[in-house]
Amino acid sequence: MVSERDHEYMRRLGEAKAAARADAVLEHQRLAPIERLRRSFAMSAALRERANLAARVDDPSAFYDRARALGLCD
């Protein structure tokens, strides 16, 4: 059985996580689109070695190829 104290703790934890997520979303929305693209590309490149590409249902390669062609990322 879960105590009322445990319920209250989990409620507060959920609120804290929701607030942190909302802050992260606002920070992301404040970025210029080019900066969002640069960060997305950097994250994609950094995690590429660990990615299970065979399990992927989408392929962002065309997106980044187009961004490179437009000079938006390296």
Image: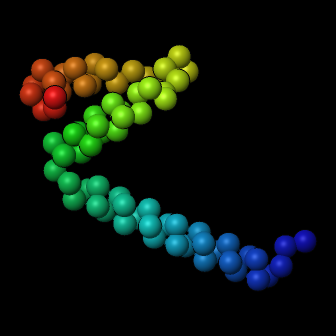
Q: In which quadrant is the C terminus drawn?
A: top left
Looking at this view, is 44 or 66 the one in front?
Answer: 44
Give the residue drawn at x 31%, y 62%: 26
Judge from the rendering whether residue 54 lies leftward or rightward of residue 65; answer left or right: right
Say how the picture is coloured: rainbow
Q: Is residue 57 visible?
A: no
Judge from the rendering whether residue 25 lies leftward or rightward of residue 72; answer left or right: right
Give the residue drawn at x 39%, y 21%: 59
* Residue 14 quadrant: bottom right
Give the residue drawn at x 41%, y 33%: 47
Judge from the rendering whether residue 48 lies leftward or rightward of residue 8; answer left or right: left
Vertical position of residue 13 compared to residue 70: above or below = below
Looking at this view, is 11 or 35 the one in front?
Answer: 35
Q: Residue furthest bottom?
A: 5
Q: Position of residue 61 (x, y in %)?
A: 31, 20
Give the residue drawn at x 12%, y 32%: 72
Q: Is residue 43 visible?
A: yes
Q: Residue furthest left?
A: 71
* Residue 38 quadrant: top left
Count of numbered marks: 0
Judge from the rendering whether residue 30 lies leftward or rightward of residue 23; answer left or right: left
Q: In which quadrant is the N terminus drawn?
A: bottom right
Q: Position of residue 41 (x, y in %)?
A: 28, 34
Vertical position of residue 19 compared to residue 42: above or below = below
Q: Residue furthest right?
A: 1
Vertical position of residue 29 compared to residue 18: above or below = above
Q: Position of residue 23 (x, y in %)?
A: 37, 66
Vertical position of residue 11 compared to residue 41: above or below = below
